Each structure stands twice: as C-alpha cells, then as structure tokens.
Amino acid sequence: MRQRALGFAALATATLVVAGCSTVSNEPAPSGSDAAAAGPFTIGISNGFVGSEYRTQMIADIEEAASEYQEAGTLEELVLENADTDVNGQIQQVRNLINAGVDAIIADPNSGSALDQVFQEATDQGILVFAIDQAMTAESVINVGIDQELWAETSAEWLAEKVGDGGSIVAVNGISGHPANEARWGAAQAVFEEAGIEVLTTADGGWDQATGQQEMGNLLATYPDIDGVWTQDGMALGVLQALIAADKQDEIVMSGEARNGFLRLWSEQADGFESIGVVNPPGTGATALHIAMAMLQGAELDESQLQDGHDIVLELEEAVTADNFDEIWAEVESQPDTYVLDSVLTAEDVQQFLQ
C-alpha cells in the first residue's frame, strides 16, 4: 500500500479546468499507431458528492496523477465537474463534459444505473467512460474499484465473531439508495443473518462524522444494551465519540475505518479496545486515470483480467486490526485526521490489466 501525504486544496462546486503544460509531445504513443493516439488529451471528472474527506482526497489523488501527464505534454486539460448534486445534476455534469470535448470521463456515480443513458451518449461519441468507487451496470462503462461487498463482509465478519451468535447490533450506514451503500449493507446484512446476529435498526449517517455521532447518540438512547455497531467509513470516528460520551466504548464492539481521525482516537483508548478498519482507497480515481491515459494512447483491456466483462476489481489492502495497529499507525500518525489510508496503482502497475 503506497501511503503518502497530500496537500488538499479547497474544491470548487463548479466546473474547474486544470490546464496542463502547453508543450505537446511529438513522441509516438507506446501502443498506438496513429497520430491522434499521441495526444494531448482532455479527461473529464464527474463527482456528484463533495461532502466527505474521502472525495476530497480522491480528487487530490487524481490531480496529482494528472500532473505527471501534463508535465509530459500528453494531457492538456483535466476538467472537473465537482459539486453536491442529485442524479439529474450528475447527468448534466456528464453532458457538460461531453460538450467540452473530453476524450475520457471518470465518474464517481450517484446511481448504479440512472446514468446509463448519458454514459451511452458519451461512448457513442468515442469517449472512454470509467466508473470508480461503485460499479455501473452499463457494459460500455469500465468499472474500476474494490469489491464493495467484500469490503463490507470483511468488517461484518469481524464484528459477528466478536459479538457472537445471538448478539444484537445496530448499523450506522451512509446514504440510503446510494449504490455503494446498498452494496455494502446488503453484503453485511447477509453476514449477520448467517451468523445469527440480530440487527435491531439502522440509521443514515451520510458518511459524515458529526451526523454519525448524532445518530449513534440517538441509537444509544433507544438501544442502550446493544452488543455491537457496524458502520462505514466517514462515520466511525463520530460513532466512537458517541460511545465514549456514553462511557460504553469498552462494552460495545464497533467496526471502524481506515482514517486517521478514527485511528488516532483508537490509539488513545485503554488496552483491550479493538476495532477494524478496512481500507477503501481514494486513489482508485488516480488508478482509473492511468488506465484511461494508457487506453487513449492505444492500449487495450486484457479481457482475461476483467470480471463480468467490464470490471477491473482492485485487491483489498490489509485491514487495520489490533494485530497490526501499532505498525500501521506508526506509518501514518503524522498525517492529518482527514487522511484516508490510500493506495494508487502507477502507470506501470496498471499494465497488468492491459495488452
């Protein structure tokens, strides 16, 4: 896992164009045969949710990866459509990118299927389309990301083992209806059902620390005798803060997150406290950008490396547990609390998916 410090600039809630180097490379593309394959190219980013540090880091990772190509003269512009919006608003984001003449679109979609038509409009015009963070159903879209169901199963199985058959838990989820949330919670529910764990209720924390803390406080008022809490990234710090406020952090077992704010509070707890943080790397967007640039320069996907014909599934990094906590915390302790444990596949790394 490549972990590094990132400087996060404030992200505008409107279209932002990051201009690249004006020098255009005259070198032929590594795998292409025509002049167009040498670039320079324009890549568009569609992000319909900006209310989390995860998305901030995701955009920063993309910009850092893009700068390498801008310096080389193969990427002319990175066009960012970055704003809190609903599905219809994200459809307009994608249309804006199409109208801007981009060569590829990387989207973190608000829906698993509602964007299919506008993505098809893009691919019909020869634009490569990538979905990150959550998979799209449209076969014309190349999905790049971790297995969200496996991500959820990993922490759910850990929690089920700690709570035991017959235990009761509550869940603080992200945003109901969001594809990542639905994939995660569906997988976690199946684990709990099989393990004989009773899920008393769920609440939406909006992948937000403050909301997660408030919702957990409300849940404790109604269900003070629960055995455990399952939650997702962005909210685990708030959940732990609520448990500490109720002096129940040593009684109620919780799943956590691989984010520095949570890890720091974990490090301050008494011996015996344990949790789990499953890594969901924001660097997936930068990995997709490397794949896009390679394909624009003539590389093709290796179908033998794909799942379901259009999915590039990235391996999960090692989860943070009590067994490796000290080692991992020593590596990232100097990072800000907003930092999410990260990994980015380099331009060389992504060749495993190409031919």
Image: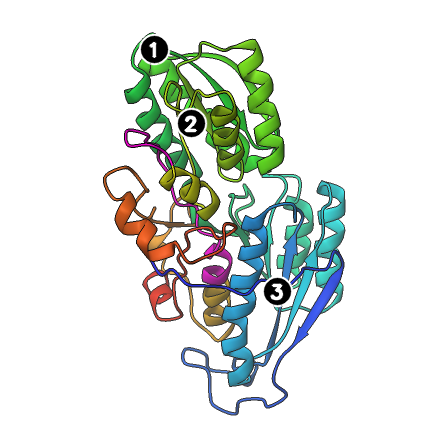
Report the amino acid beneath label 1.
Answer: Gly
Q: Nearer the viewer, residue 10 or 39?
A: 10
Q: Which range is magenta?
A: 269-288
Report the amino acid beneath label 3.
Answer: Gly
Examine the structure image and report whether residue 46 is included in the region drawn in magenta: no
Report the amino acid beneath label 2.
Answer: Ala
| Sequence-earlier tag: 3 or 1 | 3
User: At 50% from the left edge and 69% from the top edge, which residue is drawn?
Assistant: 65
Judged left or right of residue 93, residue 351 is: left
Majority SS type along the magenta span: loop
Quote the CA–CA distance across marks 3 and 1.
Answer: 50 Å
Q: Which residue is mark 3?
A: 126
| Sequence-earlier tag: 1 or 2 | 2
Q: Which residue is mark 1?
A: 196
User: From the viewer's perspective, is residue 339 above or below residue 135?
Assistant: below
User: From the viewer's perspective, is residue 81 above or below residue 74?
Assistant: above
Could you say which disc has been placed on residue 187 in the image?
Answer: 2
User: At 44% from the left edge and 48% from the top edge, which residue is drawn?
Assistant: 260
| Sequence-earlier tag: 2 or 3 | 3
- Residue 305 percent location from the top left of the image: 33, 54
Quadrant for residue 178, please give it. Answer: top right
Residue 207 seen in the current view: no
- Residue 334 percent location from the top left of the image: 41, 58
Quote the CA–CA distance across marks 1 and 2.
Answer: 15 Å
Quote the CA–CA distance across marks 2 and 3.
Answer: 35 Å
Q: Quadrant of the C terminus?
A: bottom left
Judged left or right of residue 247, residue 271 is: left
Q: Nearer the viewer, residue 215 or 55?
A: 215
User: At 61% from the left edge and 35% from the top edge, which residue is drawn?
Assistant: 210
Q: Quadrant of the N terminus?
A: bottom left
